Image (spheres, grey):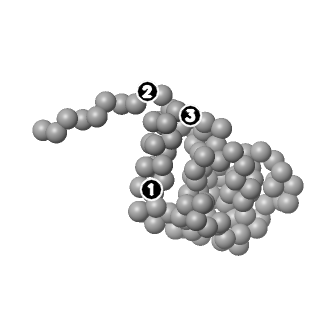
Amino acid sequence: MDDATLYRITTWRKRLERRGWTSLRRARPPRGRLIEYHVIWEGQLVSGRVRLADLDDQAYWQPGSPIALLERGLDVVEGVWRVARDPGAVSGQVRRPVPWDGPPTAARSPR
């Protein structure tokens, strides 16, 4: 990723931290509670909900699994997590292209 994309990703993380999310660089998520997360990995935005304690230990070694992304952090560019607001929510994972990958957008001029 180019410098402009990395800058956008960093500002995205900081914006989420201001809204109550915790950076993976600052703290690892709790294993026994349902968490929500966003991770930039292999040019994708990986988001989901998971209770890490419910996952099989073999998932630790599967690239792209929640436990590998959140605890191992291998090839993770940035990541954030928070305790899920709805503890009864369904677990799952979604992968999307990083929306900032590409040429920078023009800055808006003041009006």
- Label 3: few (<14), some or many (≥20) within 10 Å? few
- Would residue 75 be seen by someone viewing this image from the given angle? yes
Quarter location, residue 75: top right
Residue most toward the top?
Answer: 103
Please, what is the three-letter code of the amino acid marked with disc 3? Met
Which residue has dot 1 on it?
14
- Side of 86 relative to 111 (left or right): right
Which residue has dot 3 on it?
1
Residue, x 65% and y 66% (percent of image)?
28
| Image spot of residue 31 (x, y percent) | 71, 69
| Image spot of residue 87 (x, y percent) | 59, 69
State the residue in front, 94 or 2. 2
Residue, x 61% and y 53% (percent of image)?
48
Secondary structure of the residue carrying numbered label 2:
loop
Residue, x 16% and y 39% (percent of image)?
110
Secondary structure of the residue carrying numbered label 1:
helix
| Image spot of residue 32 (x, y percent) | 70, 72
Contact flag, marks 1 and 2 (Cβ < 8 Å): no
Residue 1 vertical placement versus 27 (above, below): above
> In terms of sequence position, does the residue under pointer 1 or pointer 3 come before the other?
3
> In terms of sequence position, does the residue under pointer 3 or pointer 2 come before the other?
3
Please, what is the three-letter code of the amino acid marked with disc 2? Pro
What is the spatial separation of the Cα atoms under label 3 and label 2, in whole angstroms? 11 Å
Q: For the C terminus, which image quadrant?
A: top left
Which residue has dot 2 on it?
103
